[in-house]
Image (cartoon, helix red, strand yellow):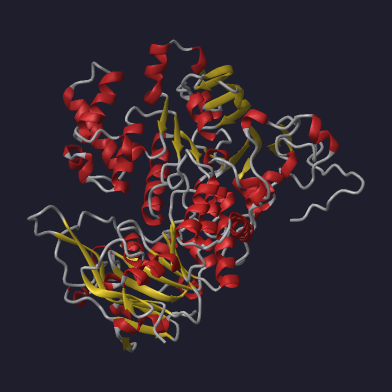
Amino acid sequence: MTQTQQQPVLRVIDLQVTYYTDSGRVRALDGASFTLNPVEKMGLVGESGSGKSTMALAMMRMIKPPGRIEGGKVIVDDVDLTQLSDSDMRKARLSRISYIPQGAMNSLNPVLRIEAQMRDAIKAHVPEMSGSEVQQRIGEALESVDLNRNVARMYPHELSGGMKQRVCIAIGILLKPKLIIADEPTSALDVVTQRQVMETLDRVQKQLGAAIILIGHDMGLMAQFVDKVAVMYAGRLTEISTVKQMFTTPMHPYAIALIDSLPTLENKGVFKGIPGLAPALLRLPPGCAFHPRCPFAMDICRTEVPALEEKAGRLVSCHLYDKNGNRVHQPGEAVLQR
Amino acid sequence: MAPLIEFRNVTKTYTKGLLSRTATTALDDVSLQLDEAHPTIMTVAGESGSGKTTLAMLLLGFIPPSTGTILYKGKDISRMSNEERVTFRKEVQAVFQDPFAVFNPFYTVDHLLSVPIEKFKLAKSKGEARNQMEEALNAVGLRPEDILGRFPHQLSGGQRQRINVARALLLKPKLIVADEPVSMVDASLRATILESLRKLNRDYGISIIYITHDLTTAFHVANSIIVLYRGSVMEAGNVDRVIKEPQHPYTRLLIDSIPWPDLNRKWGQTEIIAREQVYGQVERGCKFTSRCPFVMDKCRQAPPPLYKINEDRVATCYLYDQQPTIAREKLSEMLPV
C-alpha cells in the first residue's frame, strides 16, 4: 500500500470517444492522455462543446449511444475501468470514482428524504452493512460537508441550493472514492455559496486523500482551487500545466488567448475576446484544429496535428515550440505578444 | 425635466397561496432614478433571492409594485394610455439570461428581427427593414451575411445573445434592462457581449440597467452599482470604489468571495456564516444580522438608514453611524453617471 502513495491514482491513456450521428462521425474526444496523483486537483477547461463533459462521462463509462468509447484506458488504482464488466463498473462508480454532475442539486429525488437517497447508494454497493452502520456513515458524510445530521430527515425542498449541492457532495463521498469528478459543481450558485461549496470540497478531498477533476470554464475558480489546469479545444488536450505556469506563462496560443481574455481589477473596460468561433466537430479543419483562429499559424499547422508532448516541464500540443519549449522561429512571422 | 425612469418607494411582496399570511418581501422600499440627459450603466447586484430579477420585472412593467409607483418619463407605468404604453414598450427593451430559450427554433433569425420592425412600423419597405437589421447587427459586431437567413441552432450562444442585443437596438430604445445577459455564455465570449453593451451606451446614448450576481463583469461594464440583499439596498455608489474598498459587511463578504482569475488574489479568510432558512420570519432590524460578523444590539432593533460614506457612496449599516444619513429617496443622487 505504501507504493500507491507515489503512484498516480488515475492514468488516462489515449481515450477516444466517437459519436455516430446521421451527418457523420464526430470525434468528441481524440486521444486524451494524462495522469493524476493522490490529493491532486486538476481543472479541465474549454469552451462549450470542447469535450470536457464527454471526457468525464467516458471516465465514468456513461457515454450513451450514438456515442461510443472507441479506445484507450482509464486506470484508477491499477484497475482499468474500460475492461470491467457492466456490473463491476456499477460497483466501481461511487466507490472508486464518483461524479458530481452539473446542476447536481436538481438530481435529488423530491419525494424522498435525504437519508433514503443516501441509504440507497450505500445499500447498492455494500448490501451487508447494518442499519446502524449505515446511519453512522450518513451522519459522518453530512457532517464532513458542514451539514447538520438532521438534514438527513429533510426533503430536498427544505434545503437551499448550496445545501443541496453539499448533500450531493456528501453522496459523492459516501463510499470514499479515490477520484472525484465535479462537473461545474457551482455554476448555479452565487459567489458566497460557491466559495462555501468549494471550501467544503477541498476539505473533504484532503480527508479522503482523493484526487479531484474540476470541470468548468470559470478560470477564476480554477485559480482559486486547482493545482494544475488542462485546456481542451475541439476534443483534444492542448496544454496541461501547473496553475502557476498557466496563469503566468501559458504556451499554447489558445491558452494565451484564454488567459488574456480574463477580466482583472487592473484593466477596467478592456474587453479581449478570442476572435473567431470554435469549429464544428463535424467539420474539423485539417491539421491543428485551432489554426484558423491562431495568430501564429504556420504551414505545418494546416496539415499536421500536433501531438501532446512534454515541453519545458509541461504538456503542450503546438508546433510553435521545439522539444525544449523554445519558440520555433520562421521568417516574417507575427511577433508573440504577451 | 422628469427623469427617464423613477422608482418611488417601491415595495414588492409575494404571498403564498390564497389565504396564507406569510409574505416574502422581494423588494423593500427602493427608490431610484435614471436621468435621460446622462445615459449611464448601472449594475444591480446581489445573490439569488436578493430581489434583482423582481426589480427587472418591475422596470419592464411585467408585474405591478405592491406599494409605491414606477414612473417612465413622469408617467405612472400602470396608468398609461395605449399610445403611451406602445412608446414605453418600444423605448424600454430587455435582454434576458438564456440566449437559447428566446429563439423560436422554427424560424430563421430574420424573423426575430423583422417582427419588431413590423409591429412598431419602423420601416416603409422591405429594403429599409433589411438595412435596419444589417445596421443593428453591425453595431453589435456581427456580420449580417453570417447571420441573416440562419436558424438559431446554427449559431453559438454568444452570437445569439448579441442578436438579442441587436434586436433591442433596432427599436432605438432609451433604456435596456439586461438580466444576467452573460451568465450562460462561455467565458471567452462574454467580453464581446459586454463590449457591445458598452458601445450601445457610449455611441447610442442608451441607459443600461445591468442585473447580475457576477461582480467581476459588473466592475468592467458599469459606472455605478447597487448591492441588494433580500430586497434592501446594502451599499451603493461608484462601482470602482465599491468593488475595490467595500464597506458594508455584506459587500465585503461578497467581494471577498469573488474567484478572481489571479493567483496573487486568493479567496479571503472571512468566515462564512451560512444563510439559514429565514423566509417569512418577521425581522425588525437589518436583514443581514443573522450572518453579520459585526452584529450589534441595535442592528436587531430597527433597520439602519442610508449613511453617506463619501461623495459617491452610501452604506446601510450602523457601523457608519457617525456619518450623515441620507433619505432613501435621495439614493440616486449618490450614484455617478
Quarter of the image for residue B178 reads bottom left
Query: Where does residue A281 sit, x and y in percent of width and height?
Result: 62, 31
Residue ID at (63%, 28%): A282
Taking A126 as reference, is B137 above or below it? below
Instruction: Report the side of B292 relative to B146 (left or right).
Output: left
Q: Is residue B186 visible?
A: no
Q: Nearer the viewer, residue A33 or A135?
A: A33
From this view, report whether residue A111 is shown above or below residue A202.
above
Between residues A161 and B99, which one lies in front from this camera angle?
B99
- Look at 19% across and 21% down and name the residue there: A130
- Residue extending furthest right? A331
Residue B255 point in image, percent of width and height: 44, 64
Single out the residue that lies furthest toward the top: A85
Q: Could you tell me if residue A290 is visible in this image?
A: yes
Residue A56 spot, x, y in % from top left: 50, 30
The percent position of residue B190, horizontal first and vertical second, equals 55, 54
| Horizontal relation, residue A114 to residue B270: left or right | left
Which quadrant is the C terminus of chain A positioned in?
bottom right
> Looking at the image, which residue sits at the far front?
B125
Q: How many marks?
A: 0
Closest to the observer, A232 or B93 = B93
Q: Going by the image, does B198 lie left or right of A309? A: left
Whether residue A282 sits left or right of residue A168 in the image: it is: right
